[in-house]
Image (spheres, grey):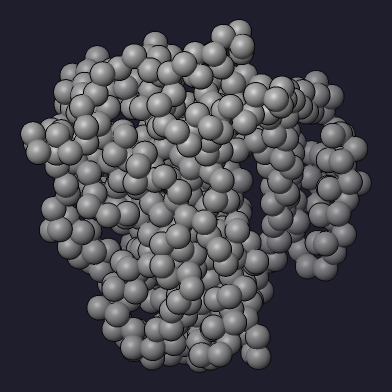
Amino acid sequence: MTENIVKEWLENVKNETLLTELKNLLSDEKAVNDRFYKHLEFGTGGLRGILGVGTNCLNIYTIARASRGVAAYMAAHGMKKIAVSYDSRINSELFAKTAARAFAARGMETVLVKELMPTPFLSFLTREEKCDMGVMVTASHNPAKYNGYKVYNSDGCQIVDAAAKEISDFIGREDYFSAEEDSFENYLSAGKIRYCADTVEEKYLAGVKRIVGAEQLGGLKLTYSALNGTGYRIIPKILKEEGVKELALVKEQCVPDGNFPTCPYPNPEKSEALSLGLKVAAEEESDLLLATDPDADRVGIAVKDGGTYKLLTGNEVGVLLTDFLLEKKKREGADTSRFVVVKTIVTTKMANEIAKKYGAEVVDVLTGFKYIGEQIGLLEKKGEQDRFLVGFEESYGYLLGTQVRDKDAVVAALAICNMAAYYKRQGKTLAERLDELYEEYGRYTHKLMSYEFAGAEGSVKIKSFMKELRDDKPAEIGGDKVVKVTDYLECEKTGLPKSNVLSFDLASGGSVVFRPSGTEPLVKIYATVRGAGNAAEKFAAVENFVKGRL
């Protein structure tokens, strides 16, 4: 079968770069198999894959096929209008225009950004333009060899399972080479594709300012890095407009560059990605370093802590925001029991303890910000969208307000600055405020462990690992007794959609959650240790347990 598909590509690929790449691969049977053993899978995260030739890679042919499938899904549901945006990655603009051509060819009115823009802007654009769907070309924080394709509903929220399954079926009916499409320029001149108006960005930024209500930021000293992504222009702009006077930019990383020359893994979760920013922050004696990932939906921070800088995790920033926002509502005289905090099942339970103090509700959802966005929609249907306070996930994604239905590093960056400025006026750093929270609620320490299994063999390995874990559930993990097991495939017990996730609560108060990534060839393991002291030792014991199972 693979041989026939490769032959079809050799006969039909017109792009010289891809054709040359394919010809060079032919002598390597394993490499050919990895590129062609399956079609790139379309799930709730859309598509994500390595750039290159083949059915299991991201290229103009896989992008066009997916877009034709999305268009067929839209037509089947009477939809007529779609928004398209893209980030700074290699081929992102090309892929966005390829998608736009496919949509226009199928009769869809297509609105395209004029230049690369953050992912949350696509969510806003989809809602503002009253589009039926939206597409964002991005691979978020992955290394340069990746790109991807996210699909959004009319409410600006990423599609969830049922829609993804239906779209996947429509994509499966499309081939790679037979469609006849006109040039991008002809569709543009015919009005079938049009560029987004500048006023949409103005409305988006005005909304961000209104949501955060930032005040007295003039005393804050900041360093900012865009990690060569889409935040390079829009985030410095809003920070300056909101009163930040001392803003140092990491110049090498505040220009769009999909090769990510100074940070090969442009993920603000990784300390290596922040090393250049930390150097600039130290030179400038900044209070705070902010770094956003290439599509500006995640933000990482480091705060001045004595003579050095402390990197805060996504969980730590999330609990700081939860506490700060609830306390702010209380100061303003609001009934804090009205508010809802939404987080994912792998995100810190410390947020639950903080919310309990204020009587606020916490809603736990499956991993993926689309499920947080979905909760906003459910509140909106009841006329209660104003109850949504904050949504966050441990992987550095945060959202305030309801104008966007995805994680938003623009609103999060401004909110974090507002919080940091507030505590600075009290003579505290964010690190010191976090210590106060640990003193009040107890210390929660978290570690994410990722194990990569690439290619066809890796896919089989991940499935067998999860199956063995289910079939032979451990009585203890790392010497810590298992007191509760939650299998998220058992949706009738969890009340959540079915998901390939296993969670083990431990006698010590900690937990270990196992989850294959939906977008990368990884098994992710989320370990939590309660209490002070021996976290490193306990994490090492969990790692030994995992290695014994692999």
Residue extending farthest to the left is 190
Quarter of the view holding residue 539: bottom right
Q: Nearer the viewer, residue 175 or 220?
A: 175
Quarter of the view holding residue 416: bottom left
Image: 230 above or below 422: above
Residue occupying image coordinates x 67% and y 38%: 522
Q: Nearer the viewer, residue 151 or 357?
A: 151
Image position, residue 209 (x, y; %): 25, 68
The answer to whether 514 appears left or right of 91 in the picture is right
Residue occupying image coordinates x 84% and y 24%: 472
Image position, residue 433 (x, y; %): 56, 78
Image: 55 above or below 251: above
Q: Nearer the viewer, residue 262 or 45?
A: 262
The answer to whether 528 appears left or right of 278 in the picture is right
Residue occupying image coordinates x 22% and y 44%: 112
Residue occupying image coordinates x 34% and y 14%: 178
Quadrant where the C terminus sits is top right
Image position, residue 153 (x, y; %): 30, 34
Please tell me how many numbered marks the rendered image carries.
Answer: 0
Quadrant where the N terminus sits is top right
Image: 127 above or below 203: above
Task: Tell me, yes or no, if residue 146 can be seen here.
Answer: yes
Task: Tell me, yes or no, if residue 329 can be seen here.
Answer: no
The answer to whether 166 appears left or right of 179 in the picture is right
Image position, residue 386 (x, y; %): 27, 53
